[in-house]
Image (spheres, rainbow, N blue to C red):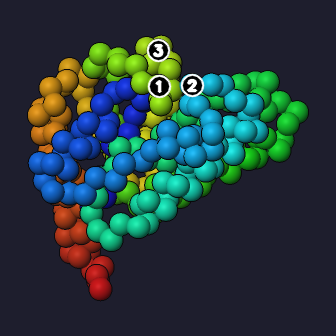
Amino acid sequence: MTIAIVGSHRTGKSTLAADYSAATGVPFVRTSASGTFERLGLSPKVDLPIEQRIAVQNAILQDADAAYAAQSGVFVTDRSPLDMAAYMLADVQRATCVDRPDVGHAIQDFVSRCFDVTNRHFSLVFVVQPAIPIVDDEKSAPGEAAFMEHMNALVLGMCSSELYQGVHYYLPRKIVDRQQRVTALANSIAQSVNLSRERATQLQESGVAFH
């Protein structure tokens, strides 16, 4: 089972992925949007024209897809394309697309590919919501609480979409202890595995053959 830890920036996704990897031995694949920005000579803290923003998001998705495809087995990562779709949609306002069908189509195409890449690589996504103290980071988007809540809502919407074919769980905000977060993630994974086994058994009992 491949696992993506998703959510707004500054919520502890990378720390949780690293802690889970250390506890279980499951490889941790770091998804570095900031690395893509740096490679392109840009900053994630700066607002970009929508055309340039689309190009950057496509580059982030391409880099992430390549990193995921390089793995040969189970792994955990600290972001998924669902996050990327959410960040793209966060930049969409009325003035962004009205009378600009090329921009609207490009954004819709990007979001669609985000779902495709997620479905290809991940069977479980685990949402980490804003809860821990905000720590500023020069390489991340602005650590502003209202903006983080906006992103959290968008990510939850992505995870709940019928276009996502896997399962999703979310971490209750009251869980801020690092070990308790690892335990919550492990419990969600175990629950997902059990559900998959139950569904497989039901299908076999109904006469479906597996090869």
The reply to whether discs 2 and 1 touch (Cβ–Cβ < 8 Å) is yes
Q: CA distance from mark 3 to mark 2?
A: 11 Å
Is residue 29 toward the left or the right of residue 139 in the image?
Answer: left
Image coords of residue 104 (percent x, y): 76, 40
The residue beneath circle 2 is 45
Element at label 1: loop
Residue sitting at the far bottom: 211
Image coords of residue 192 (percent x, y): 22, 53
Identify the image quadrant of the N terminus: bottom left
| Most foreground residue, 58 or 200 | 58
Q: CA distance from mark 1 to mark 3?
A: 13 Å
The structure residue drawn at horizontal position 34% and vertical position 57%, both measured from the top left corner, is 123
Is residue 80 toward the left or the right of residue 56 in the image?
Answer: left
The residue beneath circle 1 is 138
Q: Earlier in the sequence, mark 1 or mark 3?
A: 1
The label nearer to you, 2 versus 1, is 1
| Most foreground residue, 161 or 110 | 110
Q: Can I make out residue 182 in this image?
A: yes
Within-10-Å neighbours for mark 1: few <14, some 14–19, many 20+? few
Element at label 3: loop
The kind of residue tagged 3 is Glu
The residue beneath circle 3 is 144
